[in-house]
Image (cartoon, coloured by chain):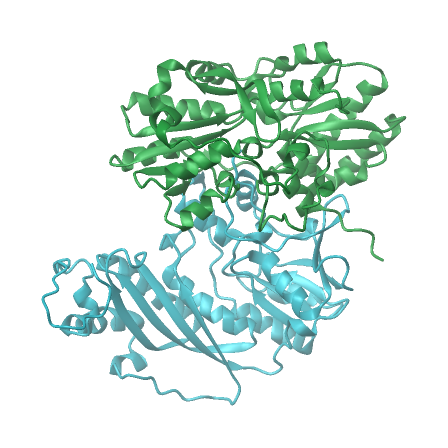
């Protein structure tokens, strides 16, 4: 197996003194309270974990965006995956995050505990390896994720095809982040005045992908990383633009993102996938919001291969207001089930589960009220 | 194949593995000549004889004091060998550590093996050698043992169950229920190393260099702390499953105060931090096998750290936080920017995230 270097921990991007300076600068620049949306769940977790959201409460309202891929994966897809896992001849592989997300009645982990064949993998290529090792079984990889993970699943299916692994297929639930931002900006009750775009997605797509969006909606976009200083610099960039009435794309995450993005990865994705209108959990159908395998790759499409197992449409749990949470219309604590009927131990909706889910972030990092 | 005990003498022929001298067979566990041969030729010599050599049904022990500590534990780690340790040394250290952090000097161990049919005997021997080294290092005696072989698929290679007996040494730390406001919290080394090492080995996450487990005995660390602090030592606990966060939650429940830790002080090695960032895990929730949380009386942290740092396992011991009056949460963490937040009780096995 290929050796991966240990990621160097980025202490300099967590420096408290530098962070405080930026916090002061943001407070100095802001003449009023601005509403910013952080698009990605990773940003939400970092903003709450490091106490940035509460430190800036008076000058910036931070609304979490829809950017948690497992949260927006439709119930139907999860139930379908569960059905496949229970067939006996299928091993259903996916990222660990996906396994705890409840479908209409239970999660993939629950299905595993009653004998379903479910395997957590760290990379789609690990699922290809499973297909090699289990030639008598069907390996279905549940391909969820934004632009960040799409190239890896495209690579996996291409690898399987090259090796003639006929027992490998993808259950595709890939989504695209820009159409979701457009859907939010188009909605009449949109309060967002600027976006913090996710650095990992832009590393693939490039930041130029946001230029037409900014031109159309006149909303500033700052591409940020996930460390406190990254986020604070991104917030400062947005506040400065808003104060001076500008709207541009600013790339704060220059160490990871180039203007044109990762071109070979984009080519790989284009070769395997095509854009489609796609249902998002909580949003409904988002035009051009997702991907499906191109006709040339239909052989590897699990929804075709196992078409007879597809479930009917399913309704969300009535207590769960994750739709409004995902669209940024309410903050998670405003949901009546938050922290009572819905906790990470017994989640009603996906955002309470995932390491990128907004409800989980608010539950985990809810600030302690001042000691009484 | 039926796993029921055989109740009749009707023919029941599950085609066991042939005895080839290189793999365990069910016959090795059936109390016959092969069982005795396995124990006499391989296990007892590897573990140094002593009480075991008599192959009696029970060990006869002499007890140096009236107050004893006793513990039991089971070890089911997969893979059996991982960077920094293996199931054998882990079983010895894990049992010894439970005694040591309870204020006892570890004396005696028992070992029960549950072996899976087909296990290579060479692998069993490697585990036995590792046990033997760990026993020598921790100066305990193995006084009794048992060996069972189960059909293929009924165990994951090799399980070990232990019991340990130790002599309580006065003054025995009074334990977490006695923690009070102002008491100070310490951790004996960088956290999360065992869990990350095993996860990386099990899932073949080819990180380079592979993170190493902290699996090590804590008896010496406990001893120097007791000698240096006497009655100022409140409680010790090895932070195994659930990590440091689980210990803090258990303690907070016992003493009904709030345990407040400071993120900036928590020692985490760069490889564990990197792997945790990559996998979306919190090092505070990840298991340790040679690292303990210690509570000491107010003002005793520097003495405790000085003592711990004289030991091999405690070189990177660090202050962790403080016991304060019960606030909104049993355990809180002060982040680098000064925000205090509740620290979650770990839930379930950590699952890696998507991106």
Residue A42, placed above or below residue A110: above
Residue A12, placed above or below residue B160: above
The spot of residue A116 in percent (x, y) is 38, 45
Query: Measuring 59% from the left and 44% from the top, which residue is drawn there?
Result: A348
Q: Colour of chain B?
A: cyan
Query: Measuring 51% from the left and 59% from the top, which residue is drawn there?
Result: B241
Query: Measuring 28% from the left and 24% from the top, which residue is drawn there?
Result: A163
Residue B153 visible in the displayed image:
yes
Q: Give the residue furthest to the right.
A: A31
Give the letter of the green chain: A
The spot of residue B227 in percent (x, y) is 62, 76
Find residue B259 and report its image quarter.
bottom right
Count of marks, rendered view: 0
Find residue A141 and report its image quarter.
top left
Q: Nearer the viewer, residue B205 or A247?
A: A247
The spot of residue B167 in percent (x, y) is 50, 82
Residue A92 visible in the displayed image:
no
The spot of residue A314 in percent (x, y) is 52, 34
Horizontally, residue A65 falls left or right of residue A76, namely: right
Horizontally, residue B245 falls left or right of residue B159, namely: right
Q: Nearer the viewer, residue B70 or A124?
A: A124
The quarter of the image holding the N terminus of chain B is bottom left
Residue A314, placed above or below residue B176: above
């Amino acid at each position: 197996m290929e050796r991966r270097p240990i990621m160097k921990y980025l202490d300099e991007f967590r420096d408290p003194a530098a962070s405080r300076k930026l916090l002061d600068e943001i407070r100095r620049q802001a003449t009023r309270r601005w509403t910013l949306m952080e698009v990605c769940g990773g940003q939400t977790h970092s903003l709450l974990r490091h106490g940035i959201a509460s430190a800036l409460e008076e000058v910036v309202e931070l609304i979490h965006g829809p950017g948690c891929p497992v949260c927006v994966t439709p119930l139907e897809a999860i139930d379908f995956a569960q059905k496949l896992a229970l067939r006996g001849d299928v091993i259903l592989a996916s990222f660990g995050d996906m396994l705890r997300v409840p479908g209409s009645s239970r999660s993939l982990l629950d299905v595993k505990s009653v004998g379903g064949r479910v395997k957590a993998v760290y990379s789609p290529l690990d699922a290809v390896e499973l297909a090699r090792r289990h030639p008598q079984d069907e390996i279905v990889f549940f391909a969820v994720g934004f632009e960040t993970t799409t190239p890896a699943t495209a690579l996996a299916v291409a690898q399987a095809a090259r090796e003639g692994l006929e027992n490998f297929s993808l259950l595709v639930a890939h989504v695209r982040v820009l159409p979701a931002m457009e859907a939010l900006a188009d909605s009449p009750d949109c309060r967002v005045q600027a976006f913090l775009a996710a650095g990992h997605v832009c590393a693939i797509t490039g930041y130029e992908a946001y230029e037409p969006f900014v031109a159309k909606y006149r909303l500033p976009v700052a591409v940020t990383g996930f460390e406190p200083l990254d986020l604070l610099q991104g917030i400062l960039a947005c506040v400065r633009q808003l104060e001076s009435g500008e709207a541009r794309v600013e790339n704060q995450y220059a160490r990871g993102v180039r203007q044109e993005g990762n071109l070979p990865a984009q080519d790989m994705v284009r070769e395997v996938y095509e854009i489609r209108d796609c249902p998002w959990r909580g949003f409904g159908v988002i035009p051009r919001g997702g991907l499906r395998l191109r006709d040339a790759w239909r052989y590897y499409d699990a929804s075709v291969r196992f078409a007879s197992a597809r479930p009917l449409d399913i309704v969300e749990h009535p207590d769960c207001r994750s739709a409004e949470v995902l669209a940024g219309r309410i903050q998670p604590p405003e949901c009546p089930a938050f922290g009572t009927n819905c906790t990470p131990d017994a989640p009603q909706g996906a955002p309470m589960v995932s390491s990128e889910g907004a409800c989980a972030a608010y539950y985990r990092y809810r600030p302690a009220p001042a000691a009484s | 194949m039926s796993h029921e005990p055989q109740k009749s003498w009707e023919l029941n022929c599950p085609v066991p593995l042939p005895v080839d001298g290189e793999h365990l067979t069910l016959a090795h566990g059936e109390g016959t000549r092969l069982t005795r041969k396995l124990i006499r030729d391989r296990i007892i010599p590897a573990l140094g004889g002593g009480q075991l050599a008599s192959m009696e049904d029970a060990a006869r022990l002499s007890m140096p004091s009236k107050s004893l500590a006793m513990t039991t534990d089971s070890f089911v780690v997969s893979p059996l060998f991982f960077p920094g340790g293996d199931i054998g040394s882990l079983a010895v250290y894990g049992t010894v550590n439970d005694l040591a952090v309870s204020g006892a000097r570890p004396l005696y161990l028992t070992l029960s093996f549950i072996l899976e049919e087909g296990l290579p005997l060479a692998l069993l021997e490697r585990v036995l050698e590792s046990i033997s080294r760990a026993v020598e290092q921790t100066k305990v005696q193995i006084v009794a043992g048992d060996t069972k072989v189960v059909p293929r698929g009924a165990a994951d290679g090799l399980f070990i169950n232990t019991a340990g007996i130790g002599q309580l040494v006065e003054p025995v730390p009074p334990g977490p229920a006695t923690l009070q406001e102002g008491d100070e919290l310490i951790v004996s080394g960088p956290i999360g190393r065992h869990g990350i090492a095993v996860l990386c080995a099990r899932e073949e996450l080819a990180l380079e260099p592979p993170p190493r487990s902290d699996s090590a005995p804590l008896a010496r660390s406990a001893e120097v702390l007791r000698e240096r602090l006497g009655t100022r030592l409140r409680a010790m606990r090895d932070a195994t499953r659930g990590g440091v966060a689980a210990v803090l939650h258990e303690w907070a429940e016992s003493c009904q105060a709030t345990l407040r830790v400071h993120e900036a002080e928590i020692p985490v090695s760069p490889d564990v931090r990197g792997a945790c960032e990559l996998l979306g895990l919190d090092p505070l929730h990840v298991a340790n096998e040679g690292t303990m949380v210690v509570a000491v009386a107010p003002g005793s942290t520097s003495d405790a750290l000085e003592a711990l740092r004289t030991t091999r396992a405690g070189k990177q011991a660090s202050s962790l936080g403080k016991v304060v009056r019960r606030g909104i949460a049993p355990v809180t963490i002060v982040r680098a920017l000064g925000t205090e937040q509740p620290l979650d009780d770990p839930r379930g096995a950590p699952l890696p995230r998507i991106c």
